[in-house]
Image (cartoon, rainbow, N blue to C red):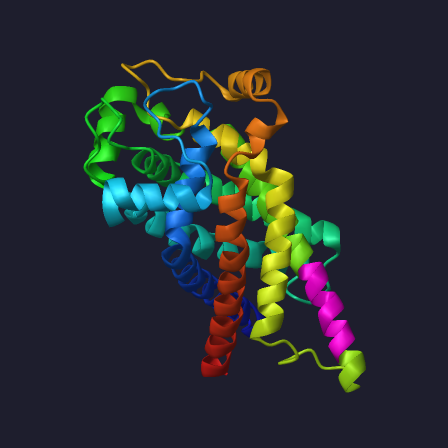
Amino acid sequence: MSESPSQQSGKRWQWENATAGAVAGFATVAATYPLDVVRTRFQVNDGRLSNLPTYKNTAHAILTIARLEGLRGLYAGFSPAVIGSTVSWGLYFFFYGRAKQRYSKNGEEKLSPGLHLASAAEAGALVCLCTNPLWLVKTRLQLQTPLHQTQPYSGLYDAVRTIMREEGWRGLYKGFVPSLFLQVSHGAIQFTAYEELRKVIVHFKQRKQNTNGADNLLNSVDYAILGGSSKVAAILMTYPFQVIRARLQQRPNDGIPRYMDSWHVVRETARFEGLRGFYKGIAANLLKNAPAASITFIVYENVLKFLHGKIN
């Protein structure tokens, strides 16, 4: 039985979404990676370990890493980050597009904010399941410093092989629970905010230009504002999950993990650092992700327009 034109069109748009998301993800991670390294090192530094360097602020951290570890230190874990970000964005937009299409009955109905939320949450959960091992390896490579006594991983392949040998499959999924909450809630908040703000701007421009059409009303500046604003909202509401995940994903010391589970991280962080502990590294995170989200959505929307124009 042959597919209808609407079914063929739906599948075509799913792959357009995936391609645009993958290109956007790569551009994002390449432009802002050193801030990601700084953020991770701030997140895990609870002030009670001697094998972690101490930085005064984001600028001091970047200068110190560059001086002591060189460019290699600023780009530690870059390979799994590139793969993970590119795959994550590609899968995220793919799953998100499919979910939106399904909830809107093949594009025949407009989605409510609740259905946008459900679409983003569904996409986030699936992406988390696929990519957690890559993020764990990235975190561990970022945390390798001259102060560490353990034999360092030489790269992505060596890290995966060593983790499998020393910790088994479970080792690759450490931090999965906070990662799942982070992925689902962060993506849901970001994409819901993006879609709703997008509607407001489109409506405003339609009234201003006295037109009912939505095509080509938005430009790269609009996408930058939409992407950055929605990202900041998501970061502020979900950042503690990032800290919990990073602390769980640290490499065990002599086979003994620093934290046993998510609840252990919450208890210890609250006890010794208070609320501030759950927001360590947020300055570097905002500096990295607010402009990064703007770049991502500029690239994504423009690649999508390009692909749509080529096919049509």
Q: Is residue 23 above or below residue 151?
A: below
Q: Is residue 229 magenta?
A: no
Q: Nearer the viewer, residue 165 or 144?
A: 144
Asked whether, in this view, residue 83 is left or right of residue 3, the answer is left
Measuring from the top left, give residue 239's x and y in whole percent.
57, 38
Taking the spot 56% from the left edge, 22% from the top edge, the residue there is 273
Q: Is residue 157 above or below residue 19?
A: above
Taking the spot 51% from the left edge, 51% from the top edge, the residue there is 287
Measuring from the top left, give residue 92's x and y in whole percent.
50, 52
Q: Residue furthest bottom?
A: 210
Q: Is residue 199 magenta?
A: yes
Taking the spot 68% from the left edge, 66% from the top edge, the residue there is 198
**Quarter of the rendering containing residue 124:** top right
Whether residue 113 is visible, yes or no, is yes
Asked whether, in this view, residue 108 is left or right of residue 87, the answer is right
Taking the spot 59% from the left edge, 77% from the top edge, the residue there is 219
Number of numbered discs present? 0
Measuring from the top left, give residue 256's x and y in whole percent.
34, 13
Q: Nearer the viewer, residue 215 or 32?
A: 32
Range of the magenta residues?
A: 195-205
Q: Is residue 286 above or below residue 259?
A: below
Q: Is residue 256 above or below residue 127?
A: above
Secondary structure character of the magenta stretch overall: helix
Measuring from the top left, give residue 128's x and y in whole percent.
47, 40
Q: Nearer the viewer, residue 83 or 29?
A: 29
Whether residue 130 is visible, yes or no, is no
